[in-house]
Amino acid sequence: MHGNTNGDAGSRTIRGFRFFSALLTEPEQFRIIDDIRDVAAAAPLFEPVTPSGKRMSVRMTSAGSLGWVADRKGYRYQPTHPSGRPWPPIPESVLDVWRRIAECKTEPDSCLVNLYGQNARMGMHQDADEANLAWPVVSISLGDDALFRVGNKTRGGTTESVWLRSGDVVVMGGSARLLHHGVDRIKFGTSRLLAKGGRLNLTLRVAG
Ligand SMILES: O=C(O)CCC(=O)C(=O)O
Ligand SMILES: [Mn+2]
């Protein structure tokens, strides 16, 4: 399948995460990809290194007044790209998704852009670097399918997995805000949304 239409849109909840399948139409997905291309032109994707010195397999950049960075000094939000320049603004096409789905009046100040190549993954983690955990994190999937895993507030325990497809949106909020989650793998080449294949994930956050 090369993108979704609103025809099969539906939502379900797993452990408090709300999964909206096929929320975004194919034209909406292409629009966002175009806008993120502009973001990456102003704030080039980089390969973050964890504090322990491991290179992450996902390439990242951000938009908004704050962007997430990882390096030998730790994980944090900061107002500038590693180049020293401010991050570009969050595109309206992306803010629109938050306005439709987040059920909160506060606007996000950060959009983390994750690009997954063929062998990229993201280990189980919590999103806990934001100043106020009352606001949700809204996650947009574009491009290739990804096997997303949801766990618990504490590390370990049972988990549940779900395939995320292009146009799906996940809201991680409320009592589920601090659940561990990660991406085990992507199914490379399942979408033609990105010319070179791969998966783009955007997470909108109120970071500051
Ligand atoms: O790629 C995804 O679906 C999840 C990304 C994520 O959890 C994060 O950026 O914190
Ligand atoms: Mn996360």
Image (cartoon, rainbow, N blue to C red):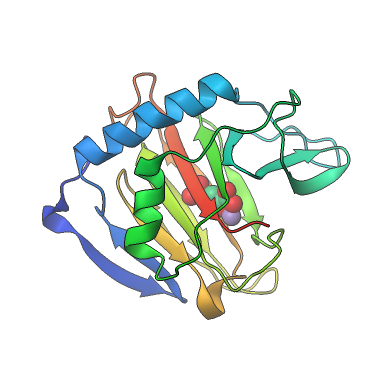
Q: Residue furthest bottom?
A: 175
Question: Considering only vertical position in the picture, is 169 above or below 37?
Answer: below
Quadrant for the N terminus in the image? top left
Q: Quadrant of ligand 2?
A: bottom right
Residue 165 coordinates in the image, percent (x, y): 32, 47
Q: Residue visible at 36% across and 31% down?
A: 33
Q: Residue at x 35, y 36 (%)?
A: 32
Q: Position of residue 52 (x, y in %)?
A: 86, 42
**Residue drawn 54% across and 75% down?**
176
Residue positioned 76% across, 48% down in the render:
76
The reply, left or right, for residue 51 in relation to residue 184 is: right
- Of the 4 image quadrants, the one containing the C terminus is bottom right
Q: Is residue 164 above or below residue 51?
A: below
Write down the quadrant of residue 63 in the picture.
Answer: top right
21 is higher (above) or lower (below) than 136:
above
Is 126 situated left or right of 193 in this image?
A: right
| Residue 82 screen position, x and y as percent | 74, 28
Displayed quadrant of residue 54: top right
Task: Return the residue nearer the eye: 178 or 148.
Answer: 178
Q: Residue furthest left?
A: 7
Report the label total.
0
Confirm whether residue 92 shows in the render. Answer: yes
Instruction: Identify whether 96 is placed above or below 35.
Output: below
Residue 183 visible: no
Q: Position of residue 183 (x, y in %)?
A: 52, 49
**Closer to us: 103 or 24:** 103
